[in-house]
Amino acid sequence: MTRIYTLANQKGGVGKTTTTINLAAYLAQMGQRVLVVDLDPQANATSCLGVDKLAVAGGTYEALLGDSNPAAYVLLNERLKLSLLPSSPALAGAEVELVDELARESRLRKALEPIAHKYDYVLVDCPPSLGLLTVNGLMAAKNGVIVPVQCEYLALEGLGQLTQTIERVRSLLFPELTVRGVVLTMYDNRTNLSSDVVTEVNKHFPNQVFKSVIPRSVRLAEAPSYGLPISLYAPASVGAAAYEALAKELLAGDKRH
């Protein structure tokens, strides 16, 4: 059974792409067939997997505009044993181009239909905004939204906006949309603030916060510049251990449901 999760948070710098890439890498390492869908015009997930975004022949832009079968643009990373539907700067124009299109909010969901069955997990990395691209990501989230939240005060303010958007999409377009879980990122055990944010997020999302907390880590910050996930860049680091634990927690939870 294919599980499609969308990682969304309109606040930038919360570890959304880092979580997408590293979760995907560990799921693949655990024998799952994984597809990463880069829905961000900045194409950070594409770069983090070692692909030059300026050399991409096609990807999510073409998939959203229905130009062809997205399978033609899926790239396989042999070393990581995971697949990528890449992004490119062309995607920045998609929001404008889709405005007059029919069923514009569900373009990604439709594009994934012919290829999703080939994978156990499809992880969609959204841009840091609440525009049409993110709405497409939410509409494609068949099994729920994973929300990375930075352990800082301002992250809590952004959570309210995201929750409202999810509610709006649920009431107007996709009643089955759920939050699969909240991932706490950039946790610093030396500060009271991090602990306070953990408490507050658990209050807002009772029983929906992953137990695996991602620490603030220099190694996690360095890995993207090498085009590698943490599982290959620094497998013995605390960041690697945290993402491996998160992948195991997600897998275990999915097996129960």
Image (cartoon, grey):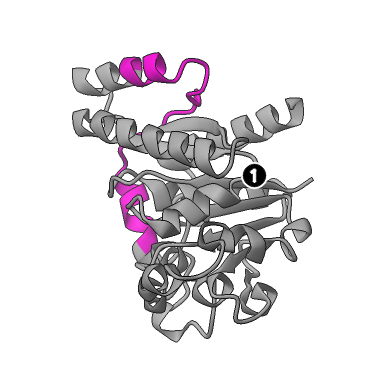
The answer to whether residue 206 is magenta is yes
Say whether residue 161 is left or right of residue 104: left
Residue 237 visible from this viewpoint: no
Q: Residues within 10 Å of mark 1 (few under 14, many from 20)?
A: some
Quadrant where the C terminus sits is: top right
Magenta highlight range? 199-224
Position of residue 42 relative to residue 142, above or below, is below
Say whether residue 58 is left or right of residue 44: right
Q: Which quadrant would residue 85 be assigned to in this image?
A: bottom right
The answer to whether residue 147 is magenta is no
Quadrant where the N terminus sits is: top right
Amino acid type for the residue under numbered disc 1: Lys
Q: In percent of the image, x 50 and y 23: which residue is there? A: 211
Residue 206 visible from this viewpoint: yes
Say whether residue 173 is left or right of residue 163: right
Label 1 secondary element:
loop
Say whether residue 1 is left or right of residue 71: right
Of 7 and 91, nearer the camera is 91
- Could you say where residue 192 lies in the image, as x and y percent from the top left? 20, 17
- Could you say where residue 152 lies in the image, as x and y percent from the top left? 23, 31
**Residue at mark 1:** 142
Q: In percent of the image, x 73 and y 50: which residue is there? A: 120
Q: Which quadrant would residue 64 be assigned to in this image?
A: bottom right
- Could you say where residue 249 lies in the image, as x and y percent from the top left? 60, 30
- Could you say where residue 226 lies in the image, as x and y percent from the top left? 39, 66
Of 228 and 180, nearer the camera is 180
